[in-house]
Image (cartoon, grey):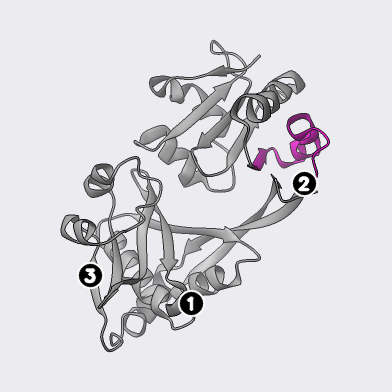
């Protein structure tokens, strides 16, 4: 049996996710914030197993009691009702990933490693002046505010609307004559943490620009009393190298199970 919760019921699964060790801020953001998300449980009265799905992100499977029938029902929903093209699964506890076939059936799947980082404040402060050094010629560092959003096509992360972003999010970008070279926004936010989302136009990559806008966003977060966090796939060397240059330190890694239509 699988039941979808309403937004005001999301708190019912909080206890099932209280000890997860990866992307904790994402779960907290779903439970606290205005992000588009769907949550499914096996039992509304006493959930023993659940799936939290921040729309467009990963599926977080967690629980206190393993339920094969719940995972099978979830798989039928994904492939028969939603007809998905990609499924990325986290399992808590991780050994439940051995049962991914209950969701995916005999579809081929891959395992990847995700990295979760925490900021070393002292390192960041030591490097801040250098990180926020001289701007490249022809570029301007600007906050991503209402005026900028009205002029440029900015990806505001997982915020439901631009209005939600303007109320609770923030970020910085480097603007060139014809548009945005690189941007860093708060993609997710809880009462105490912000998850950073960095994007760089292909022609401006490998120039240190993403590091600069990330440093500006981190500085803003710290001055606002918020803790910046960073996570990425281990194969995304560009992302975790930026993180480490900024002063982030690896907390742990987590296995994720992936299927998409390209796998034969």
Q: Residues within 10 Å of mark 2 (few under 14, many from 20)?
A: some
Disc 1 from disc 2: Cα separation: 33 Å
Position of the N terminus by quadrant: top right
Q: Position of residue 225 (x, y in %)?
A: 28, 55
Q: What label sits on residue 165 in the rendered view? A: none
Q: Residue at x 43, y 20 (%)?
A: 6
- Reply above or below: 119 against 46: below
- Reply above or below: 109 against 175: above
Sequence-wise, which precedes: disc 3 or disc 2?
A: 2
Is residue 125 visible from the viewing direction of this image?
yes
Q: Residue at x 26, y 62 (%)?
A: 152
Q: Is residue 44 magenta?
A: no
Sequence-wise, which precedes: disc 3 or disc 1?
A: 3
Q: Quadrant of residue 226?
A: bottom left
Q: Secondary structure at mark 3?
A: strand
Q: Secondary structure at mark 2?
A: loop
Relative depth, front residue between 8 and 78: 78
How many numbered circles does the render carry? 3
Q: Residue at x 38, y 38 (%)?
A: 35
Q: What label sits on residue 109 in the rendered view? A: 2
Q: Residues within 10 Å of mark 3 (few under 14, many from 20)?
A: some
Disc 3 from disc 1: Cα separation: 22 Å
Relative depth, front residue between 175 and 70: 175
Residue identified by numbered label 3 = 142
Q: Which residues lie in the magenta part?
A: 86-109
Q: Secondary structure at mark 1?
A: helix
Disc 3 from disc 2: Cα separation: 42 Å
Q: Are marks 1 and 2 in contact (CB under 8 Å)?
A: no
Q: Are marks 3 and 1 in contact (CB under 8 Å)?
A: no
Is residue 116 visible from the viewing direction of this image?
no
Q: Is residue 157 left or right of residue 169?
A: right
């Amino acid at each position: 049996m699988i039941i979808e919760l309403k937004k005001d019921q999301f708190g019912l699964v909080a206890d099932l996710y209280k000890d997860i060790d990866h992307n904790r801020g994402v779960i907290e953001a779903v439970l606290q914030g205005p992000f588009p998300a769907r949550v499914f449980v096996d039992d509304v009265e006493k959930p023993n197993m659940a799936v939290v799905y921040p729309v467009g992100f990963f599926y977080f499977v967690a629980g206190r009691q393993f339920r094969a029938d719940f995972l099978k029902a979830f798989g039928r929903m994904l492939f028969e009702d939603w007809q998905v093209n990609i499924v990325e699964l986290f399992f808590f506890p991780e050994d439940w990933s051995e049962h991914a076939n209950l969701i995916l059936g005999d579809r081929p799947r891959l395992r990847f490693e995700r990295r979760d980082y925490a900021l070393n404040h002292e390192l960041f402060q030591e490097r801040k002046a250098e990180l926020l050094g001289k701007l490249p010629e022809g570029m301007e560092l600007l906050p991503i505010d209402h005026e900028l959003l009205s002029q440029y096509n900015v990806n505001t992360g997982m915020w439901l609307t631009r209005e939600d972003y303007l109320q609770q999010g923030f970020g910085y970008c480097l603007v060139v004559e014809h548009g945005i070279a690189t941007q860093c926004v708060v993609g997710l936010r809880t009462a105490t943490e912000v998850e950073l989302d960095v994007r760089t136009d292909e022609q401006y990559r490998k120039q240190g620009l993403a590091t600069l806008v990330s440093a500006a966003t981190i500085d803003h977060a710290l001055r606002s009393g918020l803790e910046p966090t960073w996570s990425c796939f281990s194969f995304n060397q560009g992302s975790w190298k930026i993180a480490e240059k900024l002063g982030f330190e690896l907390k742990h890694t987590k296995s994720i199970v992936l299927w998409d239509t390209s796998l034969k």
